[in-house]
Image (tube, rainbow, N blue to C red):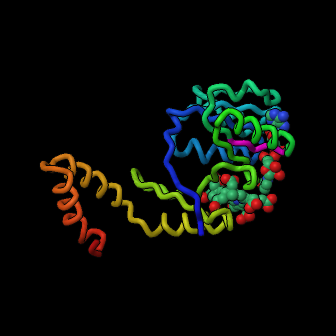
Amino acid sequence: MNQLFPIFIKLNQIHTLLVGGGKVALEKFEALASNDNALNLTIVAKEIIPEFAQLLKEYPQIDLYVRPFASEDMINKQLVIAATNNMELNEQLRNLTRQNNILFNAADKPELCDFYLGSIVKKGNLKIAISTNGKSPTIAKRLKELLNDLLPEEIDETLSLMSTYRDQLKGDFEFKVKKLNEHTKDILGHER
Ligand SMILES: C[C@@]1(CC(=O)O)c2cc3[nH]c(cc4nc(cc5[nH]c(cc(n2)[C@H]1CCC(=O)O)[C@@](C)(CC(=O)O)[C@@H]5CCC(=O)O)C(CC(=O)O)=C4CCC(=O)O)c(CCC(=O)O)c3CC(=O)O
Ligand SMILES: NC(=O)C1=CN([C@@H]2O[C@H](COP(=O)(O)OP(=O)(O)OC[C@H]3O[C@@H](n4cnc5c(N)ncnc54)[C@H](O)[C@@H]3O)[C@@H](O)[C@H]2O)C=CC1
């Protein structure tokens, strides 16, 4: 059984710290920024690969510090993602985040993580996050590709139309739920 609880985070409201500037850090950065390019992020890395530094020029709001991590970097952060090649540093980050009540992810180190990144299907306003409970990120990636192909582009139009319909509905909560369920019965092809 998978006991992980998925939540959808507003990356422009919280402040995230990414430690590391290599290939894996770049992958994690792309995973974050592809959801919200206005994200609130600080990056600290002893060294950064040129393609990562180049990409960051497109994000003037992101702070990049090319130097070793210092414990002060944790101040005012709510989420920390580590993508370093240094296990001692990973352990230090794990301990500091715990002391400061900050959620922690270390790329490819499940035993240190409070949360995992998921594979993400995106169609306009629709977003589906996939977890395999850490069993196979590759299968998560393949499922994402499959769902991306299966879901019609028009699904976003349907969401917008439903949103307008929902705003127009007058009545109490129960009435609205009934109406919305009736209206979508055929779209989804089955009854609730
Ligand atoms: C637990 C977790 C923790 C975390 O990192 O958050 C974790 C852990 C590990 N990943 C490893 C390897 C790979 N990870 C990927 C890819 C992704 N990994 C992601 C998430 C997660 N990876 C979390 C669980 C998610 C879940 O529940 O499924 C995705 C979904 C999201 C993202 O990272 O943005 C992203 C797909 C993005 C997309 O949709 O494209 C690929 C494939 C590739 O890159 O093509 C490989 C190589 C092939 C393979 O091993 O499958 C290893 C072994 C390292 C080693 O062998 O040394 C570990 C460690 C371990 O398993 O012990
Ligand atoms: N590259 C890959 O495909 C895979 C990598 N991994 C693991 O992911 C981790 C990162 O991988 P890569 O990005 O390839 O490594 P990398 O060696 O390219 O990058 C590590 C980054 O950590 C930074 N760093 C090290 N000590 C630091 C400190 N004290 N303060 C701030 N920054 C510091 C370095 O400057 C560098 O930017 C490693 O643990 C690796 O074993 C796991 C699976 C696959």
Choose between 103 and 58: the one closer to the eye: 103
Instruction: Considering the whole magenta stretch, tell me its main secondary structure.
Output: loop
* For residue 101, above or below residue 61: below
Who's the residue at 52% across and 45% down the image? 35
Give the quarter of the image for residue 22.
top right
* For residue 73, above or below residue 145: above
Can residue 82 be found in the magenta stretch?
yes
Who's the residue at 75% across and 44% down the image? 83
Which corner quadrant holds the C terminus?
A: bottom left
Choose between 89 and 64: the one closer to the eye: 89
The residue range painted magenta reads 81-85
Question: Where residue 105 appears, x then y in whole percent?
Answer: 68, 46
* For residue 61, above or below residue 175: above
Who's the residue at 19% across and 56% down the image? 174
- The answer to whether residue 47 is seen in the rendering is no
Find ligand 2 in the image and state its quadrant. Answer: top right
Who's the residue at 70% across and 44% down the image? 26
Can residue 80 be found in the magenta stretch?
no
Question: Where residue 113 appears, x then y in whole percent?
Answer: 70, 50
Question: Where residue 86 appears, x then y in whole percent?
Answer: 86, 43
- The answer to whether residue 135 is seen in the rendering is yes
Q: Is residue 36 left or right of residue 123?
A: right
Which corner quadrant holds the N terminus?
A: bottom right
